[in-house]
Structures are given as structure tokens and as C-alpha cells.
Amino acid sequence: MKQIIFIFLIVPFLGVSQVEKTSELFKTLSKNDSLIFNASFKTCNLKELGTLINDDFEFYHDKAGLMVGKETFIENTKNGLCKSPYKLRRELKKESLEVFAMHDNKGNLYAAIQKGVHSFYENDKKGSVAKFTHLWVLKDGAWLLKRVLSYDHRDPPIEINKTEMIISVNVLRNYAGEYQAPKTGKLMVAVKNNSLSIYNDKMQMKVFPESETDFFSKEKPLVFQFIKDKKGKVLKMVVFENGAAVEEAEKIN
């Protein structure tokens, strides 16, 4: 029993280790990663794709769910990516790539974990950005992809070409309160840490002043413009997306 406990204690420290980017293992799995995405997105070379996938392959996706089996994966690639009307592209963030070697309790290399971040494009338009974790297994001298975790998919960061200015807290307080919008429903505007936050039960967004009345988001292409009457009373908030007005929220409190 003591020997078993010792093994469980010592294996986590000996079993997994990050490898240098100059190592053969890193280079091999980096090449395999490239081959898989080239075969899936560029060439649709399903025969080559099959040589890189383990039979009991499993693909876990945080938006599309679970896909089980090598043949299922290849069939989905054939009927999905390969038949897409769009020009699809995957771009790896090279500096994010990491590889961790996995050894058994005798020191033999039997698997490796590969992690990184990549972006996807449709007709050269940047789509989602996501993280991935791959489990590769060494089988008869060849590295085969056994498990894929694809997660944390999000919209790409937008490019902000706006200059943030400093607004006094007293001015910001004029905008605080409750607003009612036809499509969005109830919105709250609050002053937090000398800045404005706009939120409801579904979202919360910090906005930054471009002028005394116009505030922009650094997360989405949105601008919030506060409309006042001649006496300076705030009447409503107009929401612009990509320069077009998409919503008006009346200040009700």
C-alpha cells in the first residue's frame, strides 16, 4: 500500500514536462498540427488526415459538442469544411504553442499534450479566436491525435481608432440611471471607478468617453451617445453599431 501511495505522489512530478521549442518532439508535433489543419482546411486530403488520427479519436468543442470516432471526424470534414462555399483558413498564434511530454513510471515517452491559440478566417475575414489542447499518443513510432479540446471561442478583438478623453465624475453622474429600450429592454448606467458601465441581466460593458456625450466600447464596435435637452437634462441614450443607430433607450429614472 505504501508503494502504491508513493507512485501516485511521485508520478505527477515525473510524468509531464514542458519541452523546449527546439526539441524534436516539439518540431514533430508542430508539423503534425500544421498537416492536420492543411488537410482539413486547404487540401481536403482526407487520406493524409486519416494517417494522423487515432481510431478512438474524440473531439470536444465548446460550441458544437462532442464528436466521437476517427471515421465520424473524417466524414464530417468531407461534408463540412471540404464543401464550404467560403475560403476557410486557420492561423496559429505560433508563440502560444506549447508541448508537454508524458512518460510512464519507467520513464518511457508514450504521449504528449499540445496547447495553443488559433484564429479562423472566412474569405479572409477574421472569425473566432479559440484555445486548443491536443493529446497525441505514440503508436508504433508514429504520433497520432487522440483527443482534441477546442474551447474559449470568442469574437476577435476589434481595432479601436478612438481617443479616450478624461471626463469629470460629476458629468458622468448625469448619465447614471435607468433606461428603457424597445429591443434591449431595461438598461442600467452606473458610475464605477470613475468610468461608466452599462448593464442589464444579460450583459455588462464598460464604456470610455470619446467626448462629453459619446462613449465607446473596447469590446464591440458600439458607441453610446447621450442626448440632453437645452437645460442639460439627459433624455435618452442612442446606441450605434458600426456607425449605424440600432437602438434608442429613454431615460426613465
Image (cartoon, helix red, strand yellow):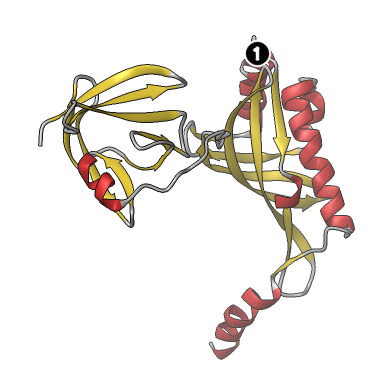
Q: Secondary structure at mark 1?
A: loop
- In this view of the protein, can residue 232 be seen by the observer? yes
Query: Is 189 positioned to the left or the right of 112 in the image?
Result: left
User: Please, which residue is most extreme toward the top here?
Assistant: 85
- Image point 62% across, 45% down: which residue? 132
* Rendered position, 103 above or below 187: below
Q: Disc 1 designates what residue?
A: 86
User: Please, which residue is most extreme toward the bottom here?
Assistant: 2
- Given residues 222 and 165, the one toward you in this image is 165
User: Residue 178 appears in which quarter of the rendering?
Assistant: top left
- Image point 45% across, 44% down: which residue? 165
Label 1: few (<14), some (14–19) or many (≥20) C-alpha neighbours in 10 Å: few
User: Residue 35 appears in which quarter of the rendering?
Assistant: top right
- Given residues 77 and 94, the one toward you in this image is 94
- In this view of the protein, can residue 142 be seen by the observer? no
* Rendered position, 113 above or below 247: below
* Residue 228 percent coordinates (x, y): 22, 28
- Given residues 109 and 159, the one toward you in this image is 159
User: Residue 157 appears in which quarter of the rendering?
Assistant: top right
- Image point 25% across, 50% down: which residue? 170
The quarter in which the C terminus is drawn is top left
* Residue 91 percent coordinates (x, y): 72, 34
Q: Amino acid at mark 1?
A: Tyr
- Image point 61% across, 18% down: which residue? 80
* Residue 163 percent coordinates (x, y): 52, 39
* Residue 134 percent coordinates (x, y): 66, 48
Query: Is 176 positioned to the left or the right of 80 in the image?
Result: left
